[in-house]
Amino acid sequence: LGFLPTSALFLIAAVKLLSRRGWGFTLLVSLGSLLLIWLVFRIVFSVLIPAGIVPEAEIIQFFRNLVAGAK
């Protein structure tokens, strides 16, 4: 599956189990944390993350094109 889907599933399960809060809190914390982790390691540190079913390279290129077009 790759890094993003498996990490999302793990974080959702862990936060739900450990926090005993509602699904809204669980999803917000889990997906927010995953986004922050991905941004730091993939964008800032340029660490290659295992490929999977998420087209990560296309997503990054889309945002780079948006930023380049805005200049």
Image: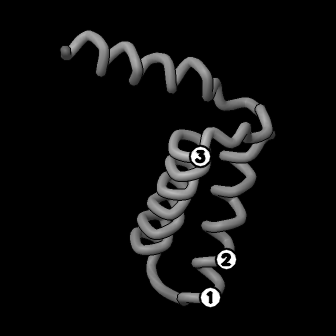
Q: CA distance from mark 3 to mark 1?
A: 30 Å
Name the kind of residue labelled 1 in the image. Answer: Leu
Name the kind of residue labelled 2 in the image. Answer: Ala
Name the kind of residue labelled 3 in the image. Answer: Phe
Q: Residue 11: x percent and y percent?
A: 64, 67
Q: At x 66% / y 46%, what residue is drawn?
A: 4
Q: CA distance from mark 3 to mark 2?
A: 26 Å
Left or right: 33 in relation to 67:
right
* Furthest-left residue in this view: 71
Q: Report the number of numbered marks.
A: 3
Q: Which residue is mark 3?
A: 45
For mark 2, give the secondary structure. helix
Q: Which residue is mark 2?
A: 14
Residue 65 sits above or below residue 47 on the image: above
Which one is nearer the viewer's eye here, 26 or 64? 64
Label 2 packing within 10 angstroms: few (<14), some (14-19), many (20+): some
Q: Which residue is mark 1?
A: 18
